[in-house]
Structure formats: C-alpha cells, structure tokens
Image (cartoon, rainbow, N blue to C red):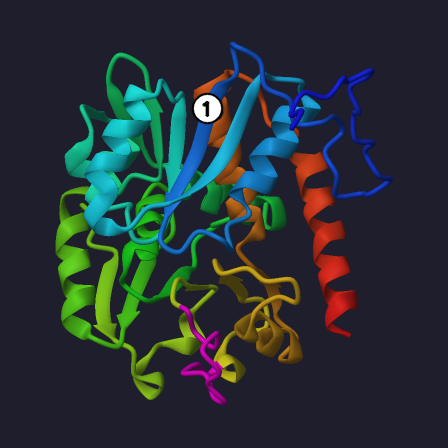
C-alpha cells in the first residue's frame, strides 16, 4: 500500500468573517514565546481571549494558553513551565495564595496582598499581584473622583477580598467594613492587613443583614459568589443604601450578575468585574511584553461577545 501522496499545494484555511476571530491566523515560529493561565477549573476563563486578541492586534510573537492545574500539581506545573522557557503566566482560583511560597521574589503588591496572580519567568520567578490595580482602575473609569471620603462595605473575606482590601487601603476612604458569614475569617484577614492599616480603617464583622451599616455605605463591593448558585434571595439590604451609593460586583457575566441586576432595579449605579479583569490583564501584559494592551479594543470585543451571548440566551 502506498502511504506517500503528492502534495501540489498547501491548503491554508480561510479566516471567516467573524467579529470574534483574531485579526490574523494563530501561527508559531521558532521564536514564539509562551504565556498562560493556571486554574482549577479553567475552561470558563476569558484571559486567553483577552491576551491573544491583544497579542494579535499588536502582532507580537506570543501564544497565551489555558492550563488546567490542580492544587496538588501546582509545584510541578510551575517548575515545568519554567523549564519549557515560558515567559510568564497568570493564576486564578485556587492558586493565588499557594503561589507565594513558590516564588523566588515578590512585588510589593504581592507582599501586601499575600497572593500572586501574575508570574514573570526570567532568571528568577517573580510573583506580582495586579488584581488591586485592576480593581481601582476599573472603578475610576466609572467614578474618576473616587473615593472623596465615604465608607466601603466588602462582602466576603476570601482571596478576592485580599486584593480589594489592599487597593482600598491605598486610598483616602474613611472606613472599610469587612463582612463575612464566618466572622472569624474576616477578623483573621483584618489582622493580616493590620501592618498596612495604621489608621485601623478595617472593621471586621459577621455578614448579618440587619447588623450592617447600610445607610453609611458609599461603595458596596461583592467578592463572593453571591447569587450565582441559584439563591432566590440575596443577603443584602440595597434599599437602605444612599441614592448615590455604587455597587461593584467583581464577578462578571454576559447579563451582569444577580447583585448588579437587583441594584439596578433599586436605581443604583453598578459595575461587574469585567473592567477589573481587563485592567489587571493589561498590567500583567505590560510586565511580560513591555507593550500597552489596547484596552478600548479589548472592551469593545468583550461587549460584542456579551451581546452575542445574550442573543443566544434569548
């Protein structure tokens, strides 16, 4: 049997006219550099979409790939990525805190936060945290004069709350109420940040709706999965918030989140976590490539994608 077949030409697949297709085919060269994101789960992540679109737009010879890495395999994954010559990677749930011990060095933001979401691989593994930057940059897109005094209420005391707390402590906000279902966890997080909270602005408390100071709050930040698990009621009292309060849910979705939709029905200004995601990605992108991410183009693409998802849902 003849397994050899004459090839007269190389068939290059055409790029269809799709608004979500990259501006150029995804081609590799001998100099292509590797970027990625580690997570468990990882299939939902928009980071590959964001970074590959930016790389393609700027015609940079990198590929950004998602890697499903379980907690028990994180040390081996970090070592393997480094051995393969990877340029850098992001980390999402549940790896941000565990990565701290695996780094050769940490940025000031990573030290303050106690978590790493971005790693640059050069001669040494350097852990960074760009989440706090992303949180504030997105907030100031909507509220350029933030904070002008006021008080914040953070729901949740997990890994995401660390970045929000770290960022808010760099501002002139008057007080930060940290509410968690398990009050001890909120207290532990407040103790962690005590060296950076010289004015003792963080006030840990239990997430008990009737005991929270809703009427004092100018910024409500949700760092939990509130409402995403099918709950019919949310542990919030949005009707008690001042009319000019801002509701910021760091979760994102094509139709907003249950919290932002509820807040909008109460006439409050809201924002989900899409802007934070883009701004933290832009900071990581610059660390790796020394180029500025085309943020406006990325946001426009994500809006189109969200609109398409909404139409499919309808």
Q: Which residues are magenta?
A: 225-237
**312 is within the stretch colored magenta:** no
Give the residue at x 51% y 80%: 238
The C terminus sits in image quarter: bottom right
In this view of the protein, can residue 99 be seen by the observer? Answer: no
**234 is within the stretch colored magenta:** yes
The N terminus sits in image quarter: top right
x then y, percent, for residue 218: 47, 64
- Camera-side residue: 158 or 24? 24
Give the residue at x 30% y 83%: 208
- Camera-side residue: 297 or 190? 297
Query: Chief secondary structure of the magenta span?
Result: loop
- Is residue 82 rendered to the left or right of residue 183? right
- Seen in the picture, residue 285 relative to 230 is either above or below; the reply is above
x then y, percent, for residue 148: 48, 50
Give the residue at x 20% y 37%: 75
- Camera-side residue: 201 or 189? 189
User: Label 1: which residue?
Assistant: 34
In this view of the protein, can residue 16 be seen by the observer? Answer: yes
- Is residue 289 rendered to the left or right of residue 158? right
Indicate the quadrant where residue 21 lies: top right
Mark 1 is surrounded, within 10 Å at the Cα level, by few (under 14), some (14 to 19) or many (20 or more) other residues, namely some
- Seen in the picture, residue 232 relative to 203 is either above or below; the reply is below
- Is residue 23 rendered to the left or right of residue 273? right
- Camera-side residue: 23 or 109? 23
Give the residue at x 38% y 52%: 173
x then y, percent, for residue 252: 55, 59
């Amino acid at each position: 049997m003849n397994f050899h077949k004459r090839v007269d030409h190389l068939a290059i697949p055409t790029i269809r006219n799709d608004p979500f297709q990259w501006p150029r085919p995804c081609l590799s060269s001998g100099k292509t550099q590797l970027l990625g994101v580690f997570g468990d789960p990882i299939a939902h992540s928009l980071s590959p979409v964001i970074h590959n679109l930016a790389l393609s737009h700027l015609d940079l010879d990198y590929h950004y790939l998602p890697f499903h890495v379980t907690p028990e395999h994180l040390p081996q994954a970090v070592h393997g990525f480094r051995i393969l010559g990877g340029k850098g990677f992001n980390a999402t749930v549940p790896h941000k805190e565990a990565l701290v011990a695996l780094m050769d060095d940490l940025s000031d933001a990573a030290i303050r936060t106690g978590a790493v979401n971005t790693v640059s691989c050069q001669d040494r593994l350097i852990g960074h945290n760009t989440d706090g930057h992303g949180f504030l940059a997105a907030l100031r897109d909507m509220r350029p004069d933030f904070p002008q005094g006021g008080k914040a209420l953070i729901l949740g005391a997990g890994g995401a709350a660390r970045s929000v707390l770290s960022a808010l402590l760099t501002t002139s906000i008057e007080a930060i109420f940290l509410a968690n279902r398990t009050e001890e966890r909120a207290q532990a997080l407040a103790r962690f940040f005590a060296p950076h909270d010289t004015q003792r602005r963080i006030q840990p408390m239990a997430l008990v709706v009737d005991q929270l100071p809703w009427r004092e709050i100018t910024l409500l930040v949700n760092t939990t999965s509130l409402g995403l698990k099918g709950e019919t009621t949310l542990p919030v009292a949005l009707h008690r918030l001042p009319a000019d309060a801002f509701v910021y849910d760091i979760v994102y979705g094509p139709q907003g989140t249950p919290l932002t939709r509820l807040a909008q029905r109460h006439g409050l200004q809201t924002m989900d976590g899409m802007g934070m995601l883009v701004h933290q990605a832009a900071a990581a992108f610059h660390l790796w490539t020394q180029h500025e991410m085309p943020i406006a183009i990325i946001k426009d693409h994500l809006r189109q994608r969200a609109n398409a998802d909404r139409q499919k849902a309808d």
